[in-house]
Every structure is written in structure tokens, then in C-alpha cells.
Image (tube, grey):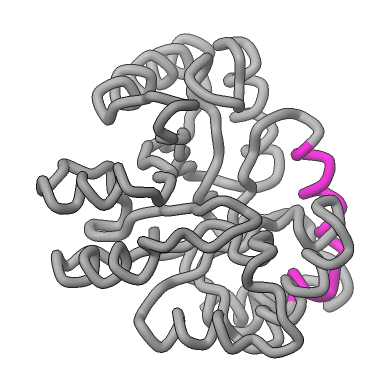
Amino acid sequence: MLGKLLKRRSNSRLEDLSVLKTDLHSHLIPGIDDGAPDMETSITLVRGLMDLGYSKIITTPHITPGIYENSENDIKTGLDKLNSALVNEGIDITLEAAAEYYVDESFLSKINNKKDWLLFAGNQILIETGFSFKPIQLEEVLFSLRTDGITPVLAHPERYLYMHERSLSQYEKLKDQGIKFQLNIGSLTGVYTKTVQKIAYKLIDAGFIDYLGSDLHNARHLSYISQTLSNPYLCKAIKSGNIQNQDL
């Protein structure tokens, strides 16, 4: 479907990202993590995503023990406030919230205690790890989530240094286990380093990407995303038929 829609546009540049419909992964709820610090900024960023063509946003605040001690109720309350502010501003967009969960021992204990998750698309959960070292609990976490009928979606897999190898064997292993990948659109610009950009390209070439996300924190990120509209790998990802944003 996405590929057919894209054929109507230039092969070298997208007009906008309306073909994706939904942005998955952003930090728009004001004052609860390293994203928008206040309501004014939140509204500005939402407008920016709308200008890029999105008609739906699934924002995903951090839940990171010891750093961003958000609860699911904190996020729900913040979502309600932001949605009310958007209505007051006359902004018509669908805004939902999940969370970006940090994988560590405390996350594993949440699984064991049957924690009420903030999921999206029914049964999917967005997770992240530290960038430098693989958490020892990762395999157990992934297995436990899948056993509970929850599909893990790994945020920005291209950014994890511990997975950077000549081959994509670690990524292949996760894909074989049914894990989904969400790639940051900004990674295609090289903003996170050229190595991250190369890995992003390789993951797209391999057909491993399931979702594209803004990971929007601030106005600077909007400019990076705008730069990708002429990036051939963004077009390649969308044309692949693997991207599922439109189904969210």
C-alpha cells in the first residue's frame, strides 16, 4: 500500500511524510523526560509533525528507573492535559501515548509482576537499552514478553554500539525471534554518527525495519527529519512494503 502511494510522488524526493500517516516514538508530553519542557513547546512540536504530513502521533515518554521515574498514570495524565491544550488551540490530530521502557532488572521484575503496560497497536511495547552494552536480561525480557503475548519493538536498533558488527547476525537473531524494529528517521542524515547512518542503511537493505519514527525531542530534530525527504533510503524503506506505520 505504501509503495503504491509512493509511486505517485517523485522517485528522488518525498513531498512530506503523509504516506506514513502515524509517527511512532516521540517525547511530547511536557516536563516529564528529556523531550518538550513545557506545554508551549509540546504544541509547537505537534504542529511541526503535522507540517511534515502526519495525521496521528503515538508519543512515547521515557520510563527509565533512576532517571525518568514516570508511571503509566503520569503519562496518561500528561496525555490528557496535552490533548486538552491541542483542542483549545484548534489543532485537529489524533494523539495517543505509549511509553519507551528501559530494559534492566527492574523492567524484568515488572514482567514477573504482570505490570499494566502502556502498549500500542493492541499488544506491542516499545523498549530500549543502553547504547554501549547489551543488558544481560535482554533475552529473558524478550522471551517473557512474547510468552505474555506482547510483541517487543526495539527502538532505534541502529544506535546500539554493541550490535555494530560487519554482519547483521545479532539483528537477524532478534528478527528470527519475532522482535520488531523501529528506526529513527533522523539516523538517515548521519546526525547520530556516520556509523549509525551506515547501520541504518544496512537494516533497510535487509528489510528489517518495521516502523519509522521521529524520536522527536525538540525543534532541531524536526529539521533533521525534513532533510531526509530527499534521502533515497527513506524512499527505499517505504517502498519495501515492510513499514507498518500506516496500520497503527
Front-most of residues 203 and 41: 203
Please state the horizontal and vertical placement of residue 195, each as a whole percent of the image: 84, 67
In this rendering, is residue 74 above or below 167? above
In this rendering, is residue 61 above or below 9? above
**Residue at horizontal 64 percent and vertical 86 percent from the top:** 168
Please state the horizontal and vertical placement of residue 127, each as a whole percent of the image: 43, 53
- Residue at the extreme front of the image, as rendered: 136
Q: Is residue 81 left or right of residue 233?
A: left
Q: Is residue 7 visible?
A: no
Count how many numbered circles sit on residues in the image: 0
Is residue 227 covered in magenta? yes
- Residue at the extreme left of the image, as rendered: 113
In this rendering, is residue 15 above or below 100? below
Q: Is residue 227 left or right of residue 217?
A: right
Q: Where is residue 206, by image quadrant?
A: bottom right
**Residue at horizontal 23 percent and vertical 44 percent from the top:** 117
Q: Is residue 155 visible?
A: yes
Name the main secondary structure of what is drawn in magenta. Answer: helix
Please state the horizontal and vertical placement of residue 57, each as a whole percent of the image: 48, 42
Q: Quadrant of the C terminus?
A: bottom left
Q: Is residue 76 left or right of residue 230?
A: left
**Residue at horizontal 52 percent and vertical 17 percent from the top:** 30
Residues drawn in magenta: 221-235
Please state the horizontal and vertical placement of residue 100, each as a whole percent of the image: 44, 44
Front-most of residues 140 and 84: 140
